[in-house]
Amino acid sequence: MASKSILTCFLRPSCTTLLGSNGTVASLLPTSYVSVQQVRHRRYPKFVVRQNKRKTWHVRKWTQKYDDNLLTSNEQFIKDVIVENYAKNSDSPLKDAPWDRNPYVYGTRRTGVLALKLGTMLQWTTEGKPFMVTLLQVLDNHVINYVPPEVYATYPSHLPHHRQKFGLQIVGALSSDPRMFSKPYNNLFIKAGVPPKRWLTRFLITPNAACQPGTPLSVNHFKVGEYVDIQGRTRDWGFQGVCKRWGMKGMPASHGVTKSHRKMGSTGGGGDKDGIWKGKHMPGIMGDILRTQYGLKIWRINTKYNVLYVTGAAVCGRPHTFVRVYDTVLPRKKRPESSYESVPMPTWFEEDATEPLPEEYFDSKLFQFTSPSLEIEEEKK
């Protein structure tokens, strides 16, 4: 059965009174739900909100600033007040006794970090084989909150098969001016005693790996040679046709083809299997969805600028966008049992360093440009 248009669903007799005099669909939907897609393979199409839209239960983040006409002296006074409230805040949770630090055991799931994707570059192995790596910078990460498993079990986003196995670790990155955000959003950071963060996310962790709110996170949370999973949002290409979205060939270039060179052709036949099947590749919104790369190796760590060098050039997202980095879930690439004692739990702290940290860590199979690339032995006379 051919799919009906969006207006056809709303203009039925039972819905005409809801539209009012203008008869627009957007007037019935919230402002964050205007971008909708039609679900085919249904008798009457339903509206599906794109995944990049804000959920109804999320706290409103951005606000409108009304300080455009401030004098320079007043602007400096406001900045001093902000520093007084945040940088010199005496209500930081870290002033209390630190939480107990548990050892790393099998099945432990630690928190992750938010990293800024810088770009890609070329590296070489000790055998001279080139490969691409992606640079991820861990910028100003702090733990914002911890939700225990029994509380997380009451959340609408809780999955039943998790039971009460995991808790939530809220992590924020990149401190910003609190005037940019709404008051409810700023209140989320009061418990951690840190300024509002531009980016906020959460990780599923086991209770033995919980971090105290206000704890800073850095690249030392990971080690060279470990494998991580990276989740990011793909590029938003908007509405695209089948040739670009699904790689279809299109119609022939000549021999009677008119204005159908980049079309998909038939969408379905007749008979018992008529209509458009579920999952049919058709034009639509392309990109801007969450994707995860699993089992990427950390080849190099720069502790001065907090940069991770991970395998490959296919990390989701455009440059200067944030991605989620956490320990891999692949069974064959998890850390061996012999290295459990050296894992920083629940994260790395400055007091753990017994000596000054080197500026960079390199994998044993990664070539360093300070090492000789060619050795020539002297001939014996």
Image: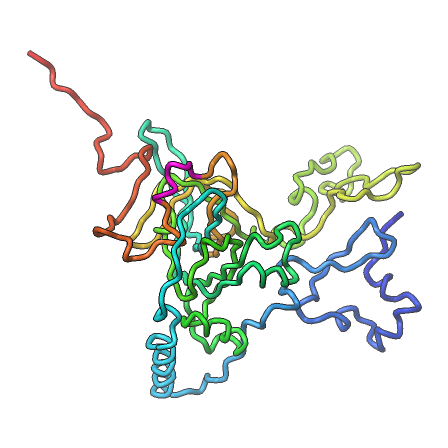
Quadrant of the image occupied by residue 272: top right
Residue nearer the viewer, 261 or 82: 82
Q: Residue at x 91, y 65 (%)?
A: 12
Q: Is residue 16 left or right of residue 337?
A: right
Was residue 303 drawn as part of the magenta stretch in this picture? Answer: no
Front-lying residue, 138 or 233 = 138
Residue that protrudes farthest toward the top in the picture = 381
Can you say which quadrant of the picture contains the C terminus? top left
Q: Is residue 336 magenta?
A: yes
Q: Residue at x 37, y 61 (%)?
A: 216
Q: Is residue 325 visible?
A: yes
In the image: residue 24, left or right of residue 205: right
Residue 56 left/right relative to 300: right
What percent of the width, then of the height, locates residue 18?
A: 85, 74
- Residue at image x 36%, y 63%? 98
* Vertical placement of residue 288 versus 297, above or below: below
Image quadrant where residue 132 sits: top left
Q: Is residue 63 above or below residue 343?
A: below
Segment colored magenta = 335-342
Given residues 339 and 247, the one toward you in this image is 339
Please, is residue 246 above or below residue 6 in the view? above
List x then y, in percent, for residue 315. 49, 46
Residue 6 location in percent, x, y? 81, 60
Position of 114 with respect to 306 (left or right) is: right
Residue 326 spot, x, y in % from top left: 47, 49
Q: Can residue 122 be seen here? A: no
Query: Which secondary structure class fits the magenta region best?
Result: helix
